[in-house]
Image: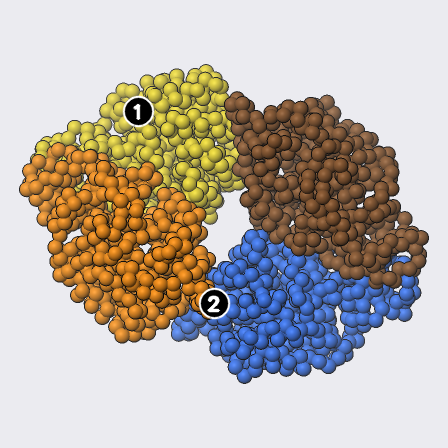
Chain colours: A blue, B brown, C yellow, D orange
Amino acid sequence: MPTFDLVVRGGTVCGPGGSGVADVGITGRRIVAVAEAGSLGDAAKVIDATGAFVVPGGVDPHVHTSLLLGEFSTLDGFAESTAAAAWGGTTTLVDFAIPQPPGVLSPLACAEQRIEMAVGQAIVDVAFHGCVVKADQISIRQIPELFGHGLTTLKVFTIYKDLVQLSLEDVRACMKEVAAAGGLLLVHAESPHIVEPLRGEFQAAGQTDAYHHALARPPESELDMVRTILELFRLTGCPGYIVHVSTPEAAIEIARARLEGTRVWAETCPHYVFLDDSKYRGEDGDLYICSPPLRPRGLADRLWHLVQNGAFQVWGSDHCCYNSAQKFKYRGDFTKTPNGMPGVEVRAPLLFSEGVMANKISLGQFVALTATNPAKLNGLYPRKGTIAPGADADLAIYDPGWEVELNSKRLHMPTDYTPFEGFKVKGWPTTVIAGGRLVVDESRFLGEPGWGEVLQTGKPTLSVS
Amino acid sequence: MPTFDLVVRGGTVCGPGGSGVADVGITGRRIVAVAEAGSLGDAAKVIDATGAFVVPGGVDPHVHTSLLLGEFSTLDGFAESTAAAAWGGTTTLVDFAIPQPPGVLSPLACAEQRIEMAVGQAIVDVAFHGCVVKADQISIRQIPELFGHGLTTLKVFTIYKDLVQLSLEDVRACMKEVAAAGGLLLVHAESPHIVEPLRGEFQAAGQTDAYHHALARPPESELDMVRTILELFRLTGCPGYIVHVSTPEAAIEIARARLEGTRVWAETCPHYVFLDDSKYRGEDGDLYICSPPLRPRGLADRLWHLVQNGAFQVWGSDHCCYNSAQKFKYRGDFTKTPNGMPGVEVRAPLLFSEGVMANKISLGQFVALTATNPAKLNGLYPRKGTIAPGADADLAIYDPGWEVELNSKRLHMPTDYTPFEGFKVKGWPTTVIAGGRLVVDESRFLGEPGWGEVLQTGKPTLSVS
Amino acid sequence: MPTFDLVVRGGTVCGPGGSGVADVGITGRRIVAVAEAGSLGDAAKVIDATGAFVVPGGVDPHVHTSLLLGEFSTLDGFAESTAAAAWGGTTTLVDFAIPQPPGVLSPLACAEQRIEMAVGQAIVDVAFHGCVVKADQISIRQIPELFGHGLTTLKVFTIYKDLVQLSLEDVRACMKEVAAAGGLLLVHAESPHIVEPLRGEFQAAGQTDAYHHALARPPESELDMVRTILELFRLTGCPGYIVHVSTPEAAIEIARARLEGTRVWAETCPHYVFLDDSKYRGEDGDLYICSPPLRPRGLADRLWHLVQNGAFQVWGSDHCCYNSAQKFKYRGDFTKTPNGMPGVEVRAPLLFSEGVMANKISLGQFVALTATNPAKLNGLYPRKGTIAPGADADLAIYDPGWEVELNSKRLHMPTDYTPFEGFKVKGWPTTVIAGGRLVVDESRFLGEPGWGEVLQTGKPTLSVS
Amino acid sequence: MPTFDLVVRGGTVCGPGGSGVADVGITGRRIVAVAEAGSLGDAAKVIDATGAFVVPGGVDPHVHTSLLLGEFSTLDGFAESTAAAAWGGTTTLVDFAIPQPPGVLSPLACAEQRIEMAVGQAIVDVAFHGCVVKADQISIRQIPELFGHGLTTLKVFTIYKDLVQLSLEDVRACMKEVAAAGGLLLVHAESPHIVEPLRGEFQAAGQTDAYHHALARPPESELDMVRTILELFRLTGCPGYIVHVSTPEAAIEIARARLEGTRVWAETCPHYVFLDDSKYRGEDGDLYICSPPLRPRGLADRLWHLVQNGAFQVWGSDHCCYNSAQKFKYRGDFTKTPNGMPGVEVRAPLLFSEGVMANKISLGQFVALTATNPAKLNGLYPRKGTIAPGADADLAIYDPGWEVELNSKRLHMPTDYTPFEGFKVKGWPTTVIAGGRLVVDESRFLGEPGWGEVLQTGKPTLSVS
């Protein structure tokens, strides 16, 4: 038995299948042993995790660093987004390579550009989803090439005309290519035939306040498109993933489809569960504009219930780091306001607090939702998402006694607001290890740009339920 | 780092959450370390598992050793049933304490009697489900006492009049007690108002061949009672478990109920998936009489599909070791023929072969279905059902290259037939460790009566999805 | 073309399939012609119906005249119940022959007794449902005899232990007999395994106020039993009818079953739609005790929606003419208070007012729900329930300009309260013809005991959707 | 009582609500009396209908006379299509005004052109559905004008790119206009995103035989689009009608939506029930090309079951009178073969034979499906679709003893094939009256061009269930 570079001693070690008090031995970048508490003695450094929960570092499958879409760009670079992620116990980000404006860059060229942006900047590991936003033959034909370059997941949008929207026929064409290449297709599912005319009618009527943003994207819009996409996944055999599901009916349709044999998984995000559309009625309603929009409290409650009961496999942030100046530039006009909210830092801690600490979900569910399942579906498993010999030594050590009230100043994202302002969070990952290195050590930040790698993803592991 | 009593080296170690090549270090009865392959060097004994799959020893949640029900008794004692289990990679049996005939023994007295039967005989560990088969006030009031004696799961039957059947009102009363005590209620769900009159009509018409056994217990009988039981679980808040679900419609109802927040899980068995009711048309049809009966091929195929897609959490054997003389004593009269078939030995290997080796389910699913989930739901986790420091050193080492054609002579149950006669099985647990001891060593049996403990179960772990 | 005894001239004549302005010519007991308005000139008497709606006299399929159940008897004889019916536009009552106490009278003897009670008393026509309330062989064997005596519909109860409850096995036996005889089985569907223990628990806790009556019979109780009964109808092939459905979920299950080929129909009653369980919170809560109980407003609204959308085929009163002295005898103790409310007089006018006049349902739906469908399902069609040559001359002439505020003094049932106290009703059948005779002539009552016949019903007409 | 021009004496007169033996008295174009059999004596002409069924003349809501679509035109003019209709007991046709090629004629100009074609030619009455096939502002704005011209139903297509397909956004715009105008929107619902790529793939692979026509339009294509259209009907409040539903799953979705309050109705056609996709495997497969395509036998059987159980309200022909030369011009290339089959003559008789005579549906259902409901939904009721004073004297007198084996020579459509070749039909409308005139008199054809009117339709009557 070798000696170790680092031993995390005596914590409650939580994998996706369960937990127990144990020592974790790390050498170099990797975990090399999990053993009885106290048994791993010889180490260059020992962290005492007694009383704490040692979980796999989070994998956030839905992050938009430096997102350019239309007039606005989000405010963080990869140094900032990966730092904020690490502060919140997340040690792997899967970001997007969205060619913008459409038609200038090919998916592959865009991917190369995005990778270049991250290299040397990232503090924890980063991978990318490819994107097809224009249905030219080049884009769709490049899908196998993207896979060859380590982007084995592809995202498409059914909405956002003139920016990223594909026709359903083109979505189907992508499914065929992704299925053939052995990848996973992510879909943003809203129905343009429902949303666009409502937007138009509200705009014509001068009803462009934030609440009308929600009214223009009713639950039916998500449900309708989810059903169509499920039918296409079924017909093409392409493994699929519906991002940021915001309504219980859509979630139930996805669960039923999976039960009947369609290979499809569902992601939701903290804001769809813990916030609701009453935010749009407030003075600062524009801060909460995102798509799909926040839903009525009744739907949000049912969504949370479904998270607890296994309808969702993945918990993503859909992080878009705008600040209030950007969100308010066209205050009162939702048609011009950028969509999205900052969230990479709080994604996992919010679920830990509201779920695990409040006895609504188990630790195993927490680990599965925030780390194991996103690692599997994004082709990063078993390197990421588990605590086992051979896995990367990415660990978040949650101190259950820590309590914090959220506000943007305490958080580390380069923005001046958080949608979760005032939330009281119990439990926080006060120590975070990534690739065997202490990135956060008892709430002191030690990470440096360049510590993170840009990962090539492998074939998705589809044994997720 | 201590030295080990036993190291299993270099196998693909599979927990419920995933797998990787690693060493497993064992000291005494327990696993003490899981570490990089080749890193655990110092051990009294080393088993080379290169190329093999190292999984947690199976937990069979549904075993009837020495079952007395009506005229017949099954033929194995605990030495025999635990031996056969071990031959098939199963290292924990959860058996039943069914007071028979009703009214003679109280549930508690029966449990004590059953425990006594197992002590000193069991080769691997055994636990028991309590049973209430008569709705006297003593029986229901004893439920908390049963829990105090280490029986935290209770089984009831909605059918088998004059033997074990409870009224629905009494089933509900049990649910209230079990919920209050923090346990789990197992239900055999068939509708007597459907089955009894059909039996009566067939009997009156002289239609008592094996095929009419199946016709007397139509799929509607299971579906109808499952719906009622789900409603009762929902209303009482009692965590529930439906044993041996044999029809896809019932399985789907259970899955929906769980999605909507009812805490309920479903078990199925190899014979409902791999056999079908064509067996009843054959000359030896009586050998296959069990309840619920084998179903038409179309339903069995859909059931297998549902196993693959996550509708089931547990894979049980419903082992009843009758021999052909017993099954044929009243040949041609299903109303007198004992119900049940031998199966504890083949439960896990059949799923490994048809599921894992045939690429229909993942290793993680196999482990969850055959070990982790039954351990959790029966209050045996994390002592059983996982490979992690602190867990019992119960391991089954599957050799994927092993091929065997099943017949009763090669198997080790004290009976002269197997319902799976002629099945070609790929992969077999040729080495089995229980409590740190080699019970089966490269197909040689080393286990001895008394090696197994009678376990007291704790509160069920309900984080199973 | 003969001359007529009576011509109803120029009204909007409404059959189940539609309506138009026309004359109706009557000779003796029967309608002999429907013709262009103004064309039927020669008649002994002419009623000018210009501006009024001429509909088939109502058929109330669910009336309990002189009901004896347990300690209490309802207060009307057949003279009173048929008079009240006629005042409300209903010209045929289908009442029940419920042998009470069980075991004294056979179904047939009870039917004979009930027929005798009605003969000479009834002012409009009356028919009877047979009932089996005890599962002795005599009762079930008498079903064909009941049919021979003109009772082709049979009712059973799944609840009311020691009074009328049958076991599910006995219900199934009745289904087999009724199916063989070509009849229709009516079922009161509530689950004793849900209701009885809740009643017991509330009683033990001293919670016997009217609101706990509703809590003891939750929606799940109806849903659960309806599902089971539907399964039994499907398996036996017996045409079925669920009386007084009170919950939308149960109604939807019935509609689905019919769509899938089970021959089953659903009845609801005015109180389940227009009243709600807030009544039980009031001081006079006990007046509203009935089973199933009134439901929460949300469910009642959904039920009304389902009435409008075709989920129900029949609108019955479930008339039980108790007075407040009876309902209050054990005030505060729902376990002793008689179940049921007076309603035969207001059944049709309430639906006319809230449905037709409020533009929620069409006249055709009104006629189908209140007359045609109950006539068909009870084997009275086309003698009853339609306006066509050959049909009985039973007509209700609704004056849409009539407005009345309901209270017990204005109504004609021998009781001192109405559950619909204060309801403002628009439109009333101010003239009513039964068997060609004017029973109510512009709000003057002319009917006399003995005008009504006791009808023998034929085979149910099952073409109802 | 006046004397009559014509009396139909002693037949079983069948309205939508039921039937009875009666006389029908006709004066001029209209029915003026329905009276006791034998009572209407004074008439210029008396038809003895003893032993026959007298039903309202059929209303075929889906007829394409002289259809021009792409390269081909169907072969009948209005004289021919109305003659064939009358031969088969149908006395009202609702045809279409489909502007072709798109962009040349406005909907209104097209309607005027179509009306002109019919005037003076039609032997029985004809009305028209307007159509929007191009989403220019003129077309959609013309919807109210169409209503003013007596076209109160509008049809749109979600498929047939470059010919008639509208985008979903434009379909929604039509719904808004139709809802505002008080009309009904008919939708041909298939998903282009499913059909178009499959067609493309099959074409590229040279798989253009008739069977691949069916494979290119899988059941999922209909189900998917029906769900979307239902969502849009629900959101816009527009009353809707799905033409030629060919799959049980889609029919069930529509039935559920209606139960939940969406105002939507469903039509199916004889070929989807009585034929199946085995036709495409035969040598003459191209003759059966239509869209949606014929379905597998299992689906067709379930569809027939749903017709019997009330899932459909309307039975249409989708008559397209091509001949074999046209269907075979591009034999073996489904992409070029015209879609559609001749059927106006056999629509009602097939349902009478397979439904009424075979005891699968009641006479009331037959009348509702073939006459009353299409009359109501197309704003022709109560002038059409019923036998009542004031209604048009359109009657079909079915002789139940007539038997015929179908072939194209016996039929009267100007084509050389019938898809129902060899079908044995029992019962035929050997006498047909339209507008009070004998068009077919005991199988002799008396009708003449110009006898039929072009009808302006009124607001749809939506009380259809």
User: Considering the numbered disc 2 on the image, is that residue within a helix, a strand or a loop?
Assistant: loop
Q: Which residue does the image show at 56% across and 82% down from the upper left?
A: A105
The quarter of the displayed image where residue C19 is located: top left
Which residue occupies the foreground of this view, B22 or C34?
A: B22
Q: Is residue B422 left or right of residue C195?
A: right
Quarter of the rendering containing residue D329: bottom left
Identify the residue shown where x is 48% and y is 28%: C171
Q: Is residue C77 visible?
A: no
Classify residue A2 by image quadrant: bottom right
Name the residue carrying label 1: C456
Callout 2, which amino acid?
A: Ala
**Image height of B292 relative to D124, above or below:** above
Disc 1/disc 2 C-alpha distance (Å)? 70 Å
**Of the numbered discs in the image, which one, if any, rests on residue D387?**
none
How many badges with numbers are in the image? 2
Quick check: C241 left or right of A124?
left
Q: Can residue A375 be seen by looking at this rendering?
A: yes
Q: Position of residue B217 (x, y in %)?
A: 56, 33
Horizontal relation, residue C351 to residue A259: left or right: left
* Circle 2 residue: D205
| Number of other residues with Cα within 10 Å of mark 1, as a class: few under 14, some 14 to 19, many 20 or more | some
- Mark 1: which amino acid? Gln
